[in-house]
């Protein structure tokens, strides 16, 4: 077990593109789990650009993270909503939609919810 580990999101262990070129998820992994950096391009919306990959009506991932840049609105299935911007800590439970606000990409780091995020569904057996 190494005492120090250095990894770069620019050389991620895995990159998952979103639909229509509206961004990507870069993952780095360690023995403690995965950490993701998502780049959500202007016009990105979960229900349009990740839902086809997830196959659920709303995002079922929990998120605990930090918004590095840009802005995003998150709306829970029950209608509760909040806007996040650069410098904000975020915790979002499963059952939500989200979209980028404005014309700047939203970049977010997530320590909890990106391990299975934007993974294509396996074909039916």
Image (tube, rainbow, N blue to C red):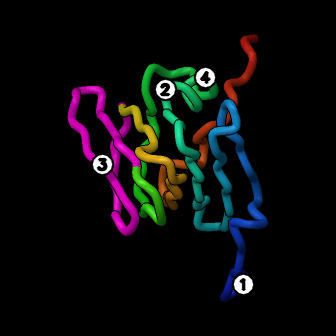
Name the quadrant of the N terminus. bottom right
Magenta stretch: give its range. Answer: 72-95
Image quadrant containing the C terminus: top right
Between residues 102 and 51, which one lies in front from this camera angle? 102
Nearest to N terminus: mark 1 or mark 3: 1
Location of residue 88 in the rendering, given as x and y in whole percent from the top left corner: 34, 64
Q: Which residue is mark 2?
A: 47
* Placement of 66 over or under 51, stated as above or below: below
Q: How packed is label 1: few (under 14 Cα within 10 Å), some, or many (20 or more)?
A: few
Element at badge 1? Answer: loop
Label 4 with label 1: CB-CB less than 8 Å: no
Q: Residues within 10 Å of mark 4 (few under 14, many from 20)?
A: some
Q: Which mark is residue 2?
A: 1
Q: Quadrant of residue 17?
A: top right
Whether label 3 touches label 4, CB < 8 Å: no
Q: Residue at x 42, y 50 (%)?
A: 63
Query: Residue 48 at x, y = what percent?
Result: 54, 25
**Which residue is label 4 attached to?**
52
42 w.r.t. 125: above or below: below
Query: For the residue carrying disc 2, how many other residues have a C-alpha within 10 Å: few (<14), some (14-19), or many (20+)?
Result: some
Q: Nearer the viewer, mark 1 or mark 2?
A: 2
Residue beneath the point at 49% across and 33% down:
45
Crowdedness near tag 3: few (<14), some (14–19) or many (≥20) residues, C-alpha within 10 Å: some
Q: How far apart are the two marked residues, 4 and 2, measured between alpha carbons?
A: 8 Å
| Between marks 4 and 1 in the image, the one whose residue lies nearer the viewer | 4
Label 3 SS: strand
Question: Is mark 1 in CB contact (under 8 Å) with mark 2?
Answer: no
**As displayed, is residue 30 above or below residue 23?**
below
Pick whichever of labels 4 and 2 is earlier in the sequence: 2
Cα–Cα span, label 2 and label 3: 17 Å
* Residue receiving disc 3: 83
The x and y percentages for residue 61 are 46, 40
């Amino acid at each position: 077990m190494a005492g120090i580990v250095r990894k770069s999101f620019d050389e991620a262990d895995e990159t998952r593109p979103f639909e229509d070129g509206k961004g990507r998820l870069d993952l780095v992994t360690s023995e403690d789990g995965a950490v993701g950096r998502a780049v959500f391009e202007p016009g990105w919306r979960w229900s349009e650009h990740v839902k086809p990959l997830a196959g659920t009506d709303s995002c079922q991932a929990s998120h605990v993270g930090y918004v590095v840049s840009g802005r995003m609105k998150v709306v829970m299935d029950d209608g509760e909503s909040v806007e996040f911007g650069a410098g904000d800590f975020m915790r979002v439970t499963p059952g939500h939609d989200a979209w980028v606000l404005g014309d700047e990409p939203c970049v977010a780091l997530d320590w909890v919810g990106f391990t299975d995020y934007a993974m294509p569904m396996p074909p039916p057996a």
